[in-house]
Image (cartoon, helix red, strand yellow):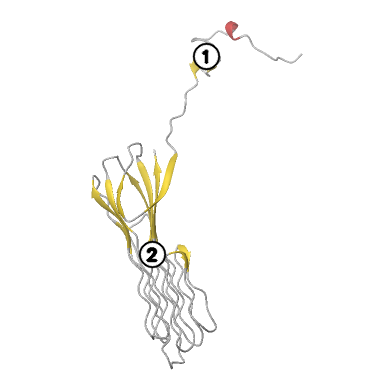
Amino acid sequence: MALTKVDKTVIEATGTASATTYLRGDGSWAAIATPAATGFSRWHIAPSGTYTVPTDITKILVEVQAGGGGGGAAASGSTNTGDGGAGGAYAKKYLAVTATHTMTVVIGAKGAKGAYGSGAAGAAGGTSSFTNLSGTSFTAISCTGGGGGQASSAGGGAGGVTTTGDININGQNGIQGATASKLGGNSAMGEGGRIQVAGNGVDATGYGGGGSGGSGEAVGGGDGSAGIVIITEYK
């Protein structure tokens, strides 16, 4: 006959047997502990401005992505092409914090494309950063934006760089043009504008990608994409 139930009152053990206790290996009844809430709390995308640590937060994970460069434009009468803008750099860092800490957040702007038919280079993407304002001494997390693509096959933009995170990913260079629109560089959080056989460059997608260059006479480049700062908060 199978044993289906044990009378707790006849078990020789210290402590009090009840519906909220359990029998330990050392022969004692102990209360079932409620685990402390130490895991994930919440996350948000920070706008540029001041970030203040909430009262219940002890650690944060910060992801900083810079903006991507714009693609270059071909000039009127030119048979060359614009070049691709580059991807912005990305860094991730874990920080111990308290509610007295405040930081400054800067979001890197997108790099604007070279205008239609202008023969102008694309603009560089903006730097994104997360910098101590008060209450802590960590080194600022800063990522430079991707360079703009040059005009008329003069060179792709240089990828953004950083060394300030626990994890650092530099942006991908833009590609120099030849007979077709050239790719914008990728970032860790975005994709560069795609190649065009003829016509205006393509805007980057996601965060921090570079726009592709314009292909053919009197065309424009594609815009890079803006950066972002994401803060994940832990109790």
Judged from this view, the residue extending furthest toward the right is: 1
Could you say which is closer to the camera, residue 225 or residue 182?
225
Secondary structure type for disc 2:
loop
Quarter of the image for the N terminus: give it: top right
Q: Residue 178 in the image: x percent, y percent?
A: 48, 87
Disc 2: which residue: 89
Q: Is residue 80 above or below residue 167?
A: below
Residue 152: give its label: none
Q: Residue 194 in the image: x percent, y percent?
A: 52, 74
Choose top left, top right, bottom left or bottom right for residue 131: bottom left
Please name the residue shown 38% across and 85% down the image: 118
| Crowding near the residue tagged with mark 2, few <14, some 14–19, many ≥20 C-alpha atoms within 10 Å | many
Disc 1: which residue: 27
| Crowding near the residue tagged with mark 1, few <14, some 14–19, many ≥20 C-alpha atoms within 10 Å | few
Q: Is residue 170 above or below residue 43?
A: below
Q: Residue 77 in the image: x percent, y percent?
A: 43, 93
Q: Is residue 183 above or below residue 98?
A: below
93 sits left or right of 29 in the view: left
Please name the residue shown 70% across and 15% down the image: 4
Q: Residue 99 in the image: x percent, y percent?
A: 29, 40
Please name the residue shown 39% across and 66% down the image: 170
Question: What amino acid does circle 2 point to?
Answer: Ala
Mark with earlier residue (2, 1): 1
Could you say which is closer to the camera, residue 66 or residue 226?
226
Judged from this view, the residue extending furthest toward the bottom is: 77
